[in-house]
Image (cartoon, rainbow, N blue to C red):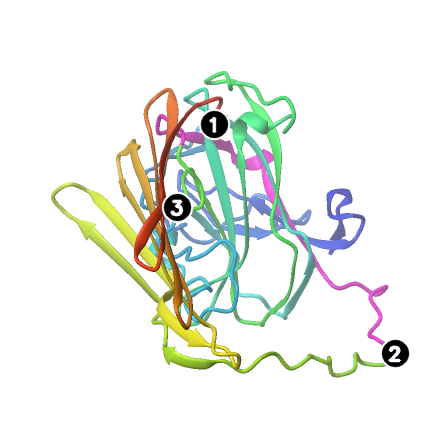
Amino acid sequence: MQTDARSGDRPAQVFGMGFDAGRATVLHALDEEKAGDASSDALDQGVSVDAADRFITHSSDLSVGTQVDTWLPMGSPIDLPSEQTPDDIRSLCFDSAGLEEALDAAGQPSVHLVFSVDKPEAHLFARLCDVWPDGSSHLITRGNMNLTHWASHEFPEALVPGATYRVDIPLKAVAQTIPAGHKVRLALSTSYWPWIWPSREKAAITIDMPGSFFTVPVVGEADAPLARPFETPLIARGETCETLKPGKPFTRRAYDVHTGELVFERSTDDDSVARTPSGFVFGSKKATKYAIREDDPLSARMESVRESVFQREGWKIETNVYSTMSCTFGDFIVETNTVVRENGKVVHDERHVETIPRCLN
């Protein structure tokens, strides 16, 4: 066990990138005896390895992110991420050996990379996964960086292809036990649609494996258990509404083998209607569709539908907002159409188009 200053002086398990016989290799616990050791191949697609220089190069296709679901879970049954293998096989993955004892992660993991890229703009997304003995992969936490922000979020700058950079990518803080016998997987990808809008050109990242590692803060001796457990939380009882039409949350994914287009649709509240004790009726219908071709970052497109209805005796308001976002090499294009009806009559109809110049994204 080591203490890493970048994890806030908390004790941290440190994992380093090994190298073996020209293969993309596993991550392993980093200590003086095992540094540089490797025992199995990593999952990979789009990977090339330079055995002489111990560099590994990867470029993800733009369909990585199919298991993402929502970036802001709000309690819907479809909010949490799915099993990660479909994304893992399209990412650059490194597995630890099976853990000999449980790893109690507590804090903010971080990935520390020495890298170069082949384009002036690039993203890197990192996922930390718990690989179960049956081989299934389950998300622990994740984080990303637009690599043009490697030195500063305030003053990003275009990358110089081929130049070497160092970057720390913090992941979301986590408190989770990874059981003994499980493996820790780090999955790296240069795209993560639809969480991240892709850069205007597909980029490949080359990682200096001996100079790269990641840390997982763990529970330490100073982390004493609570002297008295938290009491049961008190929650005020809300209004009881009558459901007139239940919503039907859904996610749909479709891939066109002829065009290479991936379409992802989701809705957390599709066409629900309820009535309050006062008799006020309200309903909503919302859905979002994301589409992208796996080899064309300029094909990215998002469509959003938001419909609401508010009604009481003799009065009804309906709103409909339809929005799209697309892009060209130089611009983002956002279009919104808003229509409001009162008792069936259109009282507001507005279309707005905004063109936003792209800048290091």
Q: Position of residue 57 (x, y in %)?
A: 41, 33
Indicate the amino acid at tag 2.
Ala
Sequence-first tag of 3 and 2: 3
The residue sitting at 82% across, 66% down in the picture is: 223
The residue sitting at 51% across, 18% down in the picture is: 158
The magenta region covers: 199-227
Q: Position of residue 245 (x, y in %)?
A: 35, 77
User: What residue is disc 1 on?
Assistant: 53
The crowding category of the residue bearing disc 1, from other C-alpha atoms within 10 Å (few below 14, some 14 to 19, many at least 20), is: few
Nearest to the eye among marks 1 and 3: give it.
3
Viewer-proximal residue, 17 or 293?
293
Alpha carbon distance from label 3 to label 2: 44 Å
Q: Is residue 106 magenta?
A: no
Under tag 1, what secondary structure?
A: loop
Alpha carbon distance from label 2 to label 1: 53 Å
User: What residue is disc 2 on?
Assistant: 227
Indicate the amino acid at tag 1.
Asp
- 311 vs 258, left or right, is right
Under tag 3, what secondary structure?
A: loop
Under tag 2, what secondary structure?
A: loop
